[in-house]
Image (cartoon, rainbow, N blue to C red):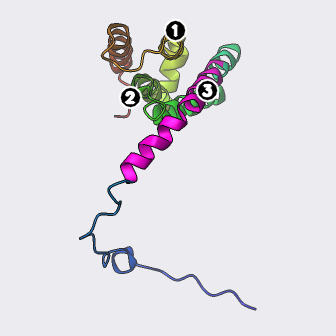
Amino acid sequence: MTRPKAQFVDPRDAGLRGLSLSRPVFDDGAVVRATQALETMGESMEAWLDADISKLQTARVGAERANWGAAELGALLVCAHDLKGMGTTYGFPLVSKLASSLCQLLDTEAGKAAAKQHPSLVCAHVDALRAAVRDRIRDEHHPTGHALLRMLSAEVAKLGVAPF
């Protein structure tokens, strides 16, 4: 049996253009059910957050031991990216913002070179993330959270390596 040839599909013709959104995509109870589901997972999410912070610390130690090599900084970026994406879901928007600052530092080759030259900035980010989770500082309205986020973001911006 021969395989069919690839078919080119123009997404403008085959997409969901015919979908009618005149009625809500979710019913009235969808948000309530989602919120309840997140609340029931609350204890699990704190354990997951603690595990993600542990992975970040392990990646930091690995990067230090490898003299801030590219592969190790890449592993650190993966951990930071996970925290950036999940911090708010875990109930810690400050974690997302601090991790975003670390991602901005490590996201480009110029940033990785700067991190190798200024490893204390990477360590400060990891320590800030660990402290925020340990002390349950959830958002930047907390005086310590606000100060940490402002200082770390400013230091990354000074380096001029952030892609955004």
Q: Are marks 3 and 2 in contact (CB under 8 Å)?
A: no
Image location of residue 148, percent across then percent down = 38, 11
Secondary structure at badge 3 equals helix
Determine the residue located farthest toward the bottom in the rendered image.
1
Pointer 2 local density, CA inside 10 Å: few below 14, some 14–19, many at least 20: some
Viewer-closest of 46 and 140? 46
Q: Going by the image, does 7 lie left or right of 162?
A: right
Q: Could you tell me the amino acid type at mark 1?
A: Ser
Nearer to us of marks 1 and 3 is 3
- The kind of residue tagged 3 is Ala
Task: Give the residue drawn at x 55%, y 17%.
Answer: 116
Q: Which residue is mark 3?
A: 47
What residue span does the magenta drawing correspond to?
30-57
User: What residue is disc 2 on?
Assistant: 162
Does the stretch in magenta take in 38? yes
Judge depth for marks 3 and 2 and give the one in front: 3
Q: Is residue 113 above or below residue 12?
A: above
Location of residue 5 in the rendering, given as x and y in whole percent from the top left corner: 60, 86
Q: Which residue is label 1 attached to?
A: 120
Main SS of residues in magenta: helix
Q: Earlier in the sequence, mark 1 or mark 2?
A: 1
- Could you tell which of marks 3 and 2 lies nearer the N-terminus? 3
